[in-house]
Image (cartoon, rainbow, N blue to C red):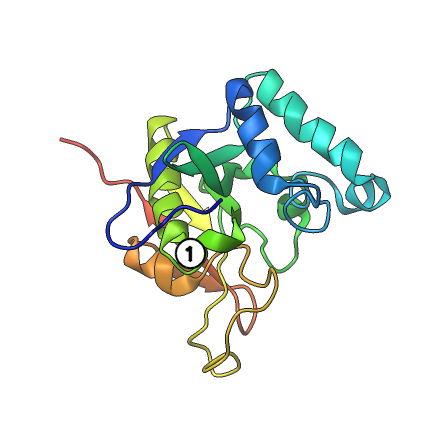
């Protein structure tokens, strides 16, 4: 991946369907995005995730695409896959539903954005923002009225002046969510927020 991203560049976002599996596999690489996760950390119960090997997690993700289940979205530049966002109805994420810190704040049906992954050469270039907008548009097309995210807030006293390390920002950054129209509805902990975007009623 050696694209020249100087100046304007077009990012296209598509649902991760069966015909795009090879692109998703290539983007995640041999490490399965983050330490063999293959974006199953929130979808599986913690006990099942812990005892499962990376290849089995990969097989689950592939099966989702093969069965016409869309586990997330892929971002492309010049037909190269460069980014990923996992989004779906909250109830599809078993560990999210059991989470104490990210527990439901009310009975509102929501679609959840739980993970971003951007290939190293394309980080810090606005790709996460493009993916977030793509996720909101996709969820709205599927009938979602409220989209929920769980980003870390780099503006908190604890994180002020620090930079992201490793996969610490994999659930997103609050400032990018704010810029996309999300608002804080709760504090999960001292550095992480629960934020929502409400789809406006169309006339």
The quadrant the C terminus occupies is: top left
**Crowding at label 1, few (<14), some or many (≥20) Cα neighbours within 10 Å?**
many
Q: Quadrant of residue 93?
A: top right
Relative height, residue 125 to residue 76 (above, below)? below
The x and y percentages for residue 14 are 41, 30
Relative height, residue 39 to residue 193 (above, below)? above
Relative height, residue 24 to residue 31 (above, below)? above
138 left or right, relative to 60: left
User: Can I make out residue 6 in this image?
Assistant: yes
Residue drawn at (72%, 51%), measured in percent from left and top? 35
Front residue of 112 and 124: 124
Seen from this angle, which residue lies furthest top?
A: 67
Front residue of 87 and 94: 87
Residue drawn at (53%, 69%), measured in percent from left and top? 164
The x and y percentages for residue 197 are 34, 48
Residue drawn at (78%, 32%), measured in percent from left and top? 56
The x and y percentages for residue 105 are 51, 53
Q: Quadrant of residue 147?
A: top left
200 left or right, relative to 13: left
Seen from this angle, which residue lies furthest right?
A: 51
Please tell me whether mark 1 sits on a helix, a strand or a loop.
Answer: strand
The x and y percentages for residue 76 are 41, 37
**Residue tagged 1:** 195
């Amino acid at each position: 991946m050696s694209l020249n991203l100087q100046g304007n560049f077009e990012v296209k976002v598509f649902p991760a369907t069966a015909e795009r599996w090879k692109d998703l596999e290539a983007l995640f690489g041999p490490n399965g995005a983050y330490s063999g996760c293959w974006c199953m950390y929130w979808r599986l119960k913690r006990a099942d995730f812990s005892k499962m090997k990376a290849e089995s997690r990969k097989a689950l993700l592939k099966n989702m695409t093969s069965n016409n289940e869309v586990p997330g979205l892929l971002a492309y530049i010049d037909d190269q896959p460069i980014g990923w966002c996992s989004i779906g109805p909250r109830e599809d994420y078993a560990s999210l539903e059991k989470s104490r810190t990210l527990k439901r704040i009310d009975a509102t049906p929501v679609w959840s954005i739980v993970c971003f992954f951007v290939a190293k050469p394309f980080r810090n270039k606005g790709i996460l923002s493009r993916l977030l907008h793509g996720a909101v548009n996709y969820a709205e097309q599927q009938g979602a009225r409220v989209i929920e995210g769980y980003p870390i807030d780099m503006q908190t006293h604890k994180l002020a002046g620090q930079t992201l390390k490793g996969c610490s920002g994999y659930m997103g950054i609050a400032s990018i969510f704010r810029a996309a129209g999300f608002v804080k509805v709760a504090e999960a902990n001292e550095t992480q927020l629960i934020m929502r975007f409400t789809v406006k009623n169309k006339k």
